[in-house]
Image (cartoon, coloured by chain):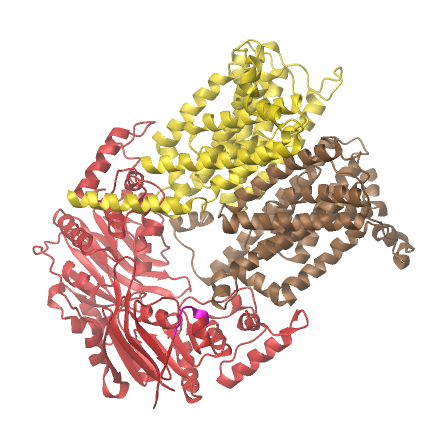
Amino acid sequence: MNQVLSLIFAPEFGYSVLRVTTPILFATLGALIADKAGVTNIALEGIMLIAALSGVVFSAITGSAGVGLLAAVAAGGLVGLFLAYCALKLRTDIILSGIAINLMASGGTVFALFLIAGDKGISSSLASKVLPKLTIPGISSIPVLGTILSGHNVLTYLALAMVAVTFVFLYKTPIGLRIRAVGENPNAAASVGIGVTKIQYMALALSGMMAGLGGAYMSMGYVSWFSKNMTAGRGFIALAAEAMGGATPLGSLLTSLLFGFFDALSNTLQLMKIPSEFVNMLPYAATVVGLVVYTVQKTRRERVAREAAGPTGNAAASGNGATR
Amino acid sequence: MDELLRMEGITKVYPNGIVANKNVDFSVRAGEIHGLVGENGAGKSTLMKILFGLNQAEEGRITLEGKEIRVDSPYAAIGHGIGMVHQHFMLVPSLTAAENLVMGLEPRKGIYLDIAAAIRTTEELGKKYNLIVDPKATVRDLPVGIKQRLEILKALFRGARILILDEPTAVLTPQETEELFSQLKLLREQGNTIVFISHKLNEIKELCDRVTIMRSGSVQGTFDVSSVDEKDISRLMVGRDVILEVEKDEAEPAETVLKVRGLVVFDRFKKRAVDGVSFSVRRGEILGIAGVEGNGQGELVEAITGLGAIAAGEVSVNGKDVDGMSIREIREAGVCHVPEDRMTYGCAPNLGVEANLMSCNHDSPEFTGPVFLKGKEIRANSQRLIAEYAVKCSSPLQEVGMLSGGNIQKVVVAREFSSGPSLIVADQPTRGIDVGATEFIRARLVELRDAGAAVLLVSADLNEVMELSDSLIVMYGGKIRAYAPDAKAVGEEELGLYMLGLKNQSSEEIARVVHD
Amino acid sequence: MTKQQRLFEVVRTGLAILIALVIALVIILVVSDDPGDALYKFLLGPLGSFRHFGNVIELMIPLVFTGIAISIMFSAAQFNLGAEGGFFIGAIATAFVAIKFNLPPVIHPIVAILFGSLVGSLFCGIPAVLKVKWGASELVSSLMFNYIAFFFGLFLINYYLRDASAGAMVSFLFKPTALLPKLVPKTRISVGIFAAVALVAVAALFMQKTRWGFRIRLTGANAKFSQYSGIDTNAVVVYSQVIGGFIAGLGGSIELLGMYTRFSWQNLPGYGWDGVIVAILARNNPLFVPIAAFFLAYLRIGADIMSRYSDVPNEFVALIQGTIIILIAASSFLAKYRHKLVFKEATRAVSAGGDR
């Protein structure tokens, strides 16, 4: 136990928390933007995969990590638009559209990888590039904090910055205001001339680009290659993290860090005698526990508010409340 | 005063064939508050929706300051300076008042939303019109009255000179109503024009300069408010054009089936929608509830049928207390329910006629064995009901959503009436359906009464409630205002006075509806 | 549904599949050096040999289980995607009984399969309870449970059932008493196929001919109406998912004991997701599930054969599957024609009624 604690309190652990949080954070912010516009982006998982592969392929072709990053973001945005087209134009249920995109992504990336790299598992034959790590001059020399905060991949810093950017975008710009209005009361938004569908297209594209950044980090930062299904459910975790974070940028950061913590913990614990599979389960179990705690607390809050407002209903009415 | 706006020869026919406006002329003078009154379904809302661009008229024209205008969307309406405050607010709850105000027309500073400017605008506009709203407050936390104020500000911010208010006082407390009136009067002084839709004649008298009265899609007249009294308005407003006779014998009421005592029910605004109501419905009688919609009838029905909560008081059916029972238990106690909203509660549009006919009784021994449903019996039963209720469908498997409104309602009543109920709660049973289906359903209700059922009939259709009921009560403001042991004996003029809250019976007279 | 609508749905499904196949054709043309041969292998390969056709049937069986599991949950309008985890953890539970217990033949597989099914239903039931009690989205929690099932399952295999003498990370051999007997020689088709056939019949009867199935369909179609009709919709939401999980677990158990002699899966098998495609193709109707499962299995095996004998990787099937889901679930796909059809039918019904 002491060994575990000493590992957790080592600055290196803090460093690895930030490292593993990065892709989840990008995807969570992606989930947030879509949710704010009233659409559920369950395709985040597939978008990250596609973006991860795009980054590897384009950086290998051009020899530039920057081009790879741009390609990953563009691919994410395009898939986001495709989801919007399916859901808003073809009127396929958005959950089913997302499932379809995830299926196409998991098979399609392997298909494309085989055609391009001649391997179905990993992209090691491609000379893909990695995005640079940054050492922050002032901070790197501070004892503990320097180890935790300095020397990360440039995308890790971008992810943290994106929390602020997303906050400003959603809460301080006219477009953000419209996105929130559309998500919460589309009739009200339409009544003042806001194009509801247009806003949702835009939100899904942005959501896809955000997940695209997460995908780029996976294959050009976290590791330096693409491998089959490498996102391992991070897109789904992001949906849970977003819900649990109360659909706010700061909440998203905190819940992403929580999952990052458990993810890093699982990596750390594997060094010890603790079963790795058991430890691997931690982030997902933590997500479910977190989601339940959040919803329990939310229902309780609502119940208190209801009781304060007036007497509750008879058995039939209150018993039926949950499914409404 | 000059005429500002004129609507001429407006005719609107809805796709289901209902004529909502028949050659309506309506005109508003600059700087007046113009009342628009009429019963539910009289065509007021349709007329105003046409003016605001939410509906398009088949015939007629609209002129503003003498020039003809086309209003094909709310956006176009606002461009002409016409704004509307709906009964259901078009606000985003999690945004602040200032954000709601500027939404769609946001002030900008570079790429950012200029929130300071939005707040300033809200304050300045609020001061100018005496419609003070805290710009930084989140709309969710605002009381209803302030939300409404914000809606008015929103319309003014977008340049409205003509404001349409659709039953604005329905959701307000008396104090809030007072405040609203003084604000509207101020708006009038500043040169704005207001169309005020209401059922409440005292409000019309207090606030309006002129009033237009509508009934059954036509205008009954426009008057200076000072030249008419409330009784005149009531007479023009409440009345029947065609008297539909329902053939039935004298009722022979027997023992009490439904007993309601001191019932209190809250609505979604936490107001007492039903406020201490007591009555009885007996075997073999149809008790009608007359009243303008939104006076607690809906909540009363929900409480009796188990869809809503009972806050206080007693509801019992055949001596069994309904409070705490599940909907299933209430149904088993012999209650059937023709719901007001048939597409939400009355049917599953994507399932077939047969499935819709068996939703309530699929687990009775008649239709199910220990494991399997009795397909043959179910089919025979649905074919019998389809024939008996003359439901026009291509097969028992046809999706209900594809039938006409009248046939959908026949499916609903066939299911409900065939359950052998001792109490039938029929909420607007013939709304929006064709004449044939309407007559059919009314005749069935009488038959069931004669067979010994107790019927509680809620209807905003005066014709229906007067002709079909044996006795009736009038609800206004969540309370019973009058009881007529013989529905035929009461005049429609008098009924109008009760429905509009102009007259009350004494509590002794009302207490006669409690049969113990 | 009336006959015309049914016909229309068949046409719509056919057209969606056709479009997807055209996309497949284009991909093959672009990718392959010998498109003719690749296409031949893809479309006719499964019929090329007895063994290949056997592979189709082998693959079809698990798809029938997850397809029906998903159909039942989707019928109640519950987006529980836990069939994937239910299938996997059900197989793990079965492996446990098959390795650790000593039971007579016949009894042994039955006990193992029942245990696996119960564990599966527990896994899919938890998200349902979380939803009914606290309103937690069953979609999100069931997705998480898939991963929990996966890692927890691997943990159990690795620490309690692992055969250290085998080179790979696999379990001990199952007791021979637990294995399902093979039905067709030279294939791996076991008597599990009887279970699949029986399940189709039972599920179809359950959904169409029992009051519990009726309540699921009613609640899925309009929950408010279902409530108004006196149905306890919360109970329906829970039991539909418990049943779905049971069937997913059943599928995993039968797959394991019918096809394998020890537990050797290193990944989630993906049959839960395939079940979504099967359910959509079959319009949540258990009777159509075998057809949809056969189609999908045929597609998969065709692609496998093609990738083995030509230069086109089999993963391109995923693109076809995705296209089919999107087109079939798209309510505006051919909506104009549906509208015309409905209108024609409505006018016909009215005029027919008028003659009466």
Chain coloured yellow in the rendered structure = C
Q: Colour of chain A?
A: brown
- Residue C256: x and y, percent? 59, 20
Residue B326 in view: no
- Residue at the spot 32% in from the left edge and 86% down from the top edge: B209
> Does residue A55 appear left or right of residue B66 in this picture?
right
- Residue at the spot 17% in from the left edge and 42% down from the top edge: B388
- Residue A309: x and y, percent? 46, 62
In the picture as drawn, the residue positioned furthest to the left comes out as B249
Position of the N terminus of chain B, as image quadrant, is: bottom left
- Magenta stretch: give its range: B70-75
Chain coloured red in the rendered structure = B
Assign the magenta stretch its main secondary structure.
loop
Query: Is residue B73 on the magenta stretch?
Result: yes
B271 and C141: which is toward the camera: C141
Above or below residue A11? Residue B267 is below
In the picture as drawn, the residue positioned furthest to the bottom comes out as B1
- Residue C250: x and y, percent? 52, 24
Query: Is residue C322 on the magenta stretch?
Result: no
